Image: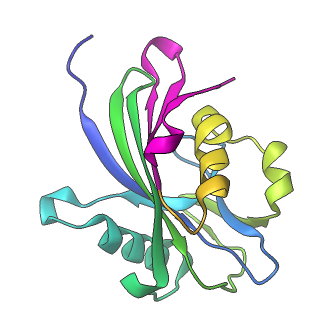
């Protein structure tokens, strides 16, 4: 396999007082026409940290002013050979307080509130459905790391931390 570029991004999980999660119905790649948490790529040329990126993305996409103290790093996901185009390193942050956000439409897509149960019926990326969301719910408020090998259309995931959970996940 040729050498692939590495991209670094954050996903930000925001909830309202009713426990609904804020999702972006994406208009642009990656994951065009699918639902995902808000987030974006780090400005690596500026030396931006993942936490600073999460604060910036929440401000840009939702219009909320938050600080690093308002965020909890729930997980780190590495995706090897995503669509055989690049590797991703993603930091998953949860805003630790409920928020009120009106549904907003902007160039990236439309923000919408969804119940946790509705995730099963929404079009979401395969790795999110099979690996990322299940791990987020399991470790919410704590911490995990996982690696997903996507090379050649595979989806093989391993929980790297916490260590006692190490081992392959069943991915559909």
Report the residue that reaches farthest toward the front.
Answer: 164
Tell me the quarter of the picture where residue 169 sits: top right
Residue 96 location (% of width, % of height) = 57, 80
Q: Is residue 169 above or below residue 39?
A: above
Residue 28 location (% of width, % of height) = 53, 46
Which coloring applies here? rainbow
The N terminus, quarter of image: top left
- The residue under the point 20% across, 20% down is 3
Tell me the quarter of the picture where residue 80 sits: top left
* Figure disc tally: 0
Let me know if residue 69 is in the magenta part: no
Of 39 and 172, nearer the camera is: 172
- The residue under the point 85% across, 53% down is 118
Taking the image as shown, residue 122 lies to the left or right of residue 138, namely: right
Taking the image as shown, residue 3 lies to the left or right of residue 92, namely: left
Q: Is residue 67 visible?
A: no
- The residue under the point 25% across, 67% down is 49
Let me know if residue 154 is in the magenta part: yes
Residue 123 location (% of width, % of height) = 74, 40
The C terminus, quarter of image: top right
Of 171 and 154, nearer the camera is: 171
Q: Is residue 108 visible?
A: yes
Report the magenta residues as a range.
144-172
- The residue under the point 68% across, 39% down is 129
Of 144 and 18, nearer the camera is: 144
Residue 23 location (% of width, % of height) = 66, 61
Of 13 and 112, nearer the camera is: 13
């Amino acid at each position: 396999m040729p050498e692939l570029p590495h991209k670094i991004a954050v996903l930000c999980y925001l909830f309202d007082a009713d426990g609904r999660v804020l999702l972006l119905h994406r208009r642009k790649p990656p994951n065009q026409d699918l639902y995902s948490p808000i987030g974006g790529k780090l400005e690596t040329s500026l030396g931006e940290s993942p936490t600073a990126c999460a604060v910036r993305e929440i401000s840009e996409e939702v219009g909320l002013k938050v600080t690093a103290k308002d965020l909890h790093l729930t997980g780190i996901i590495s995706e090897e050979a995503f669509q055989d185009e690049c590797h991703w390193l993603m930091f998953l942050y949860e805003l630790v307080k409920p928020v009120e956000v009106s549904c907003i439409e902007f160039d990236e897509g439309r923000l919408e509130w969804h119940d946790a149960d509705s995730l099963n019926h929404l079009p979401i990326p395969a790795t999110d459905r099979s690996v990322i969301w299940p791990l987020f719910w399991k470790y919410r408020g704590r911490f995990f790391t996982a690696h997903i090998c996507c090379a050649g259309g595979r989806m093989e995931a391993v929980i790297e931390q916490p260590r006692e959970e190490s081992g392959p996940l069943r991915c559909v």
